[in-house]
Image (cartoon, rainbow, N blue to C red):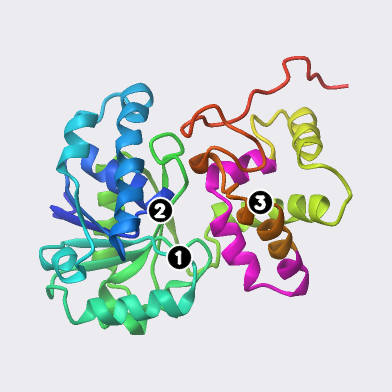
C-alpha cells in the first residue's frame, strides 16, 4: 500500500518544521516549506543548509542525497502558493491555539479538496483544531520527535471525526519517510512521548527554577542514577527552549513561574538551545547533539 501523497507542505520552519521538511524531501517527496515573512525564511535557509551536513553524517540510506534533498525544498511566504498543490500539509507552527486555529481557517479557503491536514502539535488535542480546518474527516495529528533522522518515531492520532482511511494513509506516509509509526488509539494530550517527557522536564525545571539544584547537577544525577545518555536540561537544549516556554506560559501558576525563569535567565539572553549555539550549555557548533559529558561519572 502507498499513502499516495506526492506533494508535502510544511507550515512553520522552526527547528522541527525544518527537520520534517528535510526528512520528507530526503525520501523523495516534493516539499514546500512556508513561514510568515522573509526574516523567518532566511533563518529557515540556514537551518536547512546546516541539515545537509547532518544528514550526510547521520542519516545513511535515504532515497535522495542530502544536497539534492535540500535543493528540492521550495521556501515561500505565500500561503496560497504553499497550499496550491499540497496532498498533505503538516503544520508545525507555535503551540498557541489561536494562531493554529486562524492559520487553519485561512488554509481552508486555499487547499484542494483532496488535501489531508496533520498537526505536529506537542500538547494540543487535534479535536481542538478540527472545526477550524473545514475538513475534520481529513485532519489528524502527526507528531515527530526532535532530530527526526535519529529519534524517528511518528505518533499518529485522529479524532472521532477522522476518516479511518485517512488515518491509515498517514501511518503509511510516516513509514515512507523513514519513521516508525505509532498509532494512538484515542486522543491523549501529549500522545505517548510527551505524556512521559513533559512532566519529567517540568519537574527538572522546577528543581532549578526554585533554587534546589543547578541544571548541570540535575543532569548529572539523572545520567548517573539511570544510565540515560542525556539529562533533562540537555534534552531541553535539543528541543529548544521556546516550545517548552510556550507550553509552560499557558499552564498553572507554578508553570508560569518556571516560564518566567526560562525567559529571564535564558530566552532573553538569546540562549534558546542547540540551534542558537547556547541554552543551558554552550555548544561549539549549532548541530552538536549534547555537551561533553564527564567521562569520570560512575554509579556509586
| SS of the residue under disc 2 | loop
Question: Separation of disc 1 and disc 3 at Cα?
Answer: 19 Å
Q: Quadrant of residue 260?
A: bottom right
Residue beneath disc 3: 266
Sequence-first disc among 1 and 2 = 2
Provide residue 274's location: percent of width, then percent of height: 53, 39
Q: Are marks 1 and 3 in contact (CB under 8 Å)?
A: no
Kindly report the secondary structure that dominates the magenta region of the rendered protein: helix
Question: Which quadrant, please, contains the C terminus?
Answer: top right
Q: Quadrant of residue 203?
A: bottom right
Tag of residue 94: 1
Residue 283 among those drawn in magenta: no
Magenta residues, as a range? 232-257
How crowded pointer 2 is (Cα within 10 Å; few <14, some 14-19, many 20+) is rated as: many
Residue beneath disc 2: 14
Q: Are marks 1 and 2 in contact (CB under 8 Å)?
A: yes
Residue 242 among those drawn in magenta: yes
Q: Nearer the viewer, mark 3 or mark 2?
A: 3
Sequence-first disc among 3 and 2 = 2
Name which residue lies at 36% across and 53% down.
17
Residue 111 visible? The answer is yes
Provide residue 63's location: percent of width, then percent of height: 19, 32
Sequence-first disc among 1 and 3 = 1
Amino acid at each position: 500500500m502507498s499513502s499516495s501523497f506526492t506533494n508535502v507542505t510544511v507550515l512553520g520552519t522552526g527547528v522541527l518544521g525544518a527537520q520534517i521538511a528535510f526528512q520528507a524531501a530526503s525520501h523523495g517527496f516534493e516539499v514546500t516549506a512556508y513561514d510568515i515573512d522573509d526574516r523567518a525564511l532566511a533563518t529557515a535557509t540556514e537551518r536547512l543548509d546546516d541539515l545537509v551536513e547532518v544528514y550526510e553524517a547521520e542519516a545513511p540510506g535515504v532515497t535522495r542525497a542530502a544536497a539534492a534533498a535540500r535543493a528540492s525544498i521550495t521556501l515561500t511566504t505565500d500561503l496560497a502558493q504553499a497550499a496550491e498543490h499540497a496532498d498533505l500539509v503538516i503544520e508545525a507552527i507555535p503551540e498557541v491555539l489561536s494562531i493554529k486555529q486562524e492559520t487553519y481557517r485561512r488554509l481552508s479557503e486555499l487547499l484542494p479538496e483532496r488535501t489531508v491536514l496533520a498537526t505536529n502539535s506537542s500538547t494540543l488535542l487535534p479535536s481542538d483544531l478540527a472545526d477550524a480546518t473545514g475538513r475534520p474527516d481529513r485532519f489528524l495529528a502527526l507528531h515527530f520527535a526532535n532530530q527526526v533522522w535519529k529519534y524517528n518515531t511518528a505518533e499518529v492520532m485522529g479524532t472521532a471525526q477522522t476518516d479511518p482511511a485517512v488515518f491509515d494513509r498517514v501511518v503509511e506516509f510516516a513509514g515512507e519517510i523513514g519513521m516508525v509509526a505509532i498509532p494512538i488509539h484515542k486522543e491523549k494530550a501529549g500522545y505517548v512521548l510527551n505524556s512521559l517527557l513533559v512532566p519529567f522536564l517540568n519537574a527538572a525545571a522546577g528543581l532549578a527554577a526554585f533554587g534546589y539544584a543547578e541544571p548541570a547537577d540535575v543532569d548529572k544525577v539523572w545520567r548517573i542514577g539511570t544510565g540515560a545518555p542525556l539529562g533533562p536540561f540537555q534534552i531541553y537544549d535539543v528541543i529548544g527552549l521556546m516550545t517548552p516556554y510556550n507550553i509552560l506560559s499557558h499552564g498553572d501558576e507554578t508553570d508560569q513561574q518556571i516560564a518566567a525563569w526560562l525567559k529571564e535567565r535564558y530566552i532573553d539572553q538569546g540562549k534558546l538551545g542547540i540551534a542558537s549555539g547556547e541554552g543551558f550549555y554552550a555548544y561549539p557548533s549549532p548541530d552538536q547533539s549534547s555537551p561533553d559529558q564527564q567521562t569520570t561519572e560512575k554509579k556509586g
